Image: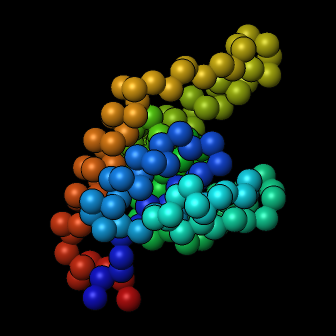
């Protein structure tokens, strides 16, 4: 029997938790919301809630330690996305942007460049607003990823 498909969510500031539950539910995928902020389980009854100790990367570390190639990781955190890709997981940003081995290097470089601009005062560091188009793109991309994972043969799973 193959490992179940899971969606691991870096949940503290994730704006698409409801969408994750909806799309994952259609595929029978388990949803794990990982937070160090303490989440109310009653708000997300279809998900497993994992509250990790406070710490800068505690949620990221939990996700990376637990991630497998049968998982989709949802996060806007580019270093976490890189680490999850190294584990073989699929990674999707909450805006619907997929991270891949082919584009993660550029994303890390862009992140570093933007951090430098903020530190030198050349940029205010404001993120673009999250809108309906981002939410729609996210739903479509998560659907595509889960469809692909559910169609993969179980024999490719390591023992």
In the drawing, does residue 94 fall left or right of residue 133? right
**Camera-side residue of 29 and 2:** 29
Query: Residue 143, relative to residue 24: is it above or below?
Result: above
Query: Measured from the top left, where is residue 136 in percent x and y?
Result: 33, 33
- Tell me, what colour scheme is on the image? rainbow
Query: Residue 105, relative to residue 117: is it above or below?
Result: below
Q: Quadrant of residue 109?
A: top right
Query: Residue 67, relative to residue 112: is it above or below?
Result: below
Q: Residue at x 60, y 22 (%)?
A: 127
In the drawing, does residue 16 fall left or right of residue 147? right
In the drawing, does residue 115 fall left or right of residue 78? right
Q: Residue at x 33, y 53 (%)?
A: 23
Q: Quadrant of the C terminus?
A: bottom left
Q: Is residue 73 visible?
A: yes
Outermost residue on the top side: it is 122
Query: Measured from the top left, where is residue 54 in percent x and y?
Result: 81, 59
Badge count: 0
Query: Measured from the top left, where is residue 84 in percent x and y?
Result: 51, 58
Q: Residue at x 46, y 64 (%)?
A: 46
Q: Residue at x 33, y 61 (%)?
A: 25
In the drawing, does residue 104 fall left or right of residue 14? left
**Camera-side residue of 27 and 102:** 27
């Amino acid at each position: 029997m193959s490992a179940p498909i899971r969606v691991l969510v870096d949940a503290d500031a994730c704006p698409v938790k409801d969408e994750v539950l909806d799309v994952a539910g259609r595929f029978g995928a388990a949803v794990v919301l990982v937070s160090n902020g303490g989440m109310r389980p009653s708000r997300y009854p279809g998900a497993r809630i994992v509250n990790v100790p406070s710490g800068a990367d505690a949620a990221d570390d939990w996700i990376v330690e637990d991630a497998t190639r049968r998982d989709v990781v949802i996060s806007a955190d580019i270093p976490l996305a890189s680490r999850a890709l190294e584990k073989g997981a699929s990674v999707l940003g909450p805006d619907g942007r997929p991270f891949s081995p082919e584009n993660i290097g550029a994303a890390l470089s862009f992140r570093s460049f933007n951090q430098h601009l903020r530190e030198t005062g050349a940029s205010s560091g404001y993120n673009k607003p999250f809108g309906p188009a981002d939410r729609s793109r996210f739903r479509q991309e998560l659907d595509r990823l889960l469809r692909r994972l559910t169609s993969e043969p179980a024999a490719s799973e390591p023992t």
